[in-house]
């Protein structure tokens, strides 16, 4: 994940401009609407999907950048959602550090041995090979293999394969993980696509602008309202556990919670409040997934946490749901599986949109 290793963007004041920069011959082909998905696995057998989307072009400090949103780099250790701003030439990729902080070189093509130090002299990135790779998306491709590591601790490192002309990291082998049992985490690019031009100002994603959205857009222009990035709804879930070996989810028990579902296009994030399932949430974290047509799928890997009620437990939880025709209710299943065989559970649920 680029944001984790290079910059932390807290707040940006941006001026949006029409996307006019051509993507031809760029190291990363940046244009609004382009997206890439990679499939990831760790050594414990957990699987999930990472999505990188190009949202818009922005002018920051007199330089044009593209706003990149990365979802689910590693939900077990890092934020589910990350935003950063990048610009690309034919041989280099730069990340905007924030107002008055300049930019950081993320990738640079060159011969084997090309290297640079960044992040205040604490990290190094170098080209260690130029080789052919084949990934689920296609190939063979000529890829530049980068090694990135911490100078004070060379045991923390990862390899990234960059293919000129493909958005994102084509392949990654990550050894920079706190839970050594998960090393290495492998990522391979599986899909690339282009989002059709959307209706600007369509806050509720229904394909049209109503009077309320039109007024809101005028208020944004006037500086009276913030822009809207997501469509957020709250759902009341009733979950019945039918088969369970987990002490906190007894068979036949019915648990209730209010769950927020944040949606951006087909990408969704499920999130619990501070109180859920009838007890305080100590392991609660965003659950990433997709909503395609009427089918919702979300999967989350939860690593062990030393201060939790079960400090050695980790599990994968998967939600599969089907929306009603009016989009106001949903039925489905939840599967929970402990990575170390601690327990497993199967449940059905009924959810209603508030």
Image (cartoon, rainbow, N blue to C red):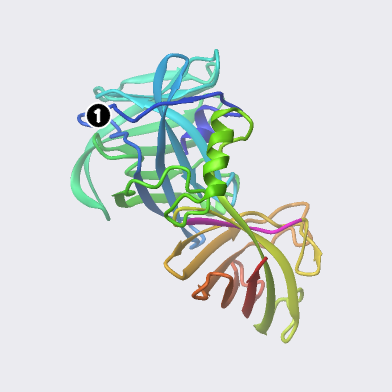
Q: Is residue 353 magenta?
A: no
Which residues are the magenta region?
A: 267-273
Indicate whether 47 appears above or below 264.
below
Q: Which quarter of the picture shows residue 207?
A: bottom left
Where is mark 1, residue-wise?
22
Is residue 272 in the magenta section?
Answer: yes
Residue 246, relative to residue 160: is it above or below? below
Residue 211 percent across, percent down from the top left = 53, 48
Horizontal and vertical percent for residue 53? 40, 43
Q: Secondary structure at mark 1?
A: loop
Is residue 155 visible in the rendered image? The answer is no
Q: Residue furthest right?
A: 279
Q: Is residue 85 left or right of residue 27?
A: right
Res 163 quadrant in image: top left
* Magenta-colored segment: predominant secondary structure: strand
The front one of 158 and 235 is 235
Q: Residue at x 53, y 21 (%)?
A: 119
The extreme front residue here reads: 211
Closer to us: 287 or 306: 287
At horizontal 46% and vertical 70% (from top left) the residue drawn is 295
Pinpoint residue 123: horizontal percent, then vertical percent.
Answer: 50, 24
**Is residue 219 found left or right of 149 in the rendered image?**
right
Q: Is residue 260 visible?
A: yes
Q: Quadrant of residue 278?
A: bottom right
Q: Residue at x 50, y 51 (%)?
A: 210
Which part of the image, by quadrant, shows the C terminus? bottom right
> Residue extending furthest left?
140
Crowd band around label 1 with a 10 angstrom C-alpha radius: few (<14), some (14–19), many (20+): few
Residue 65 position within the rendered picture, expressed as x and y whole percent measured from the top left = 40, 25
């Amino acid at each position: 994940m680029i944001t984790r290793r290079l910059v932390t963007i807290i707040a940006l004041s941006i001026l949006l401009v029409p996307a006019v920069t051509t993507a031809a011959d760029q190291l990363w082909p940046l244009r609004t609407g382009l997206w890439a998905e990679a499939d990831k696995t760790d050594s414990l057998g957990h699987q999930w999907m990472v999505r990188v989307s190009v949202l818009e072009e922005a002018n920051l400090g007199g330089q044009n950048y593209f706003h990149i949103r990365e979802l689910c780099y590693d939900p077990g250790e890092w934020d589910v959602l990350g935003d950063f701003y990048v610009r690309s030439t034919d041989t280099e990729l730069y990340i905007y550090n924030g107002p008055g902080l300049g930019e950081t070189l993320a990738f640079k093509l060159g011969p084997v041995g090309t290297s640079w130090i960044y992040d205040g002299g604490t990290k190094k990135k170098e080209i260690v090979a130029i080789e052919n790779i084949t990934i689920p998306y296609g190939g063979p491709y000529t890829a530049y293999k980068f090694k990135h590591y911490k100078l004070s601790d060379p045991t923390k490192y990862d390899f990234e394969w960059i293919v000129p002309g493909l958005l994102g990291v084509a392949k990654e082998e990550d050894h920079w993980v706190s839970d050594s049992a998960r090393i290495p985490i492998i990522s391979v690019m599986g899909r690339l696509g282009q989002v059709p031009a959307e209706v600007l100002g369509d806050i509720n994603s229904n394909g049209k602008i109503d009077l309320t959205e039109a007024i809101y857009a005028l208020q944004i222009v006037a500086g009276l309202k913030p822009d809207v990035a997501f469509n957020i709804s709250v759902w009341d879930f009733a979950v019945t556990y039918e088969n369970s070996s987990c002490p906190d989810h007894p068979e036949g028990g019915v648990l209730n919670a209010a769950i927020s579902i944040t949606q951006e296009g087909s990408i969704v994030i499920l999130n619990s409040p501070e109180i859920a399932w009838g007890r305080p949430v100590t392991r609660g974290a965003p659950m990433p997934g997709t909503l395609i047509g009427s089918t919702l799928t979300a999967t989350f890997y939860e690593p062990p946490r030393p201060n939790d009620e079960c400090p050695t437990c980790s599990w994968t939880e998967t939600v599969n749901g089907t929306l009603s025709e009016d989009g106001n209710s949903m039925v489905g299943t939840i599967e929970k599986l402990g990575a170390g065989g601690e327990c497993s559970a199967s449940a059905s649920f009924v959810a209603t949109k508030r």
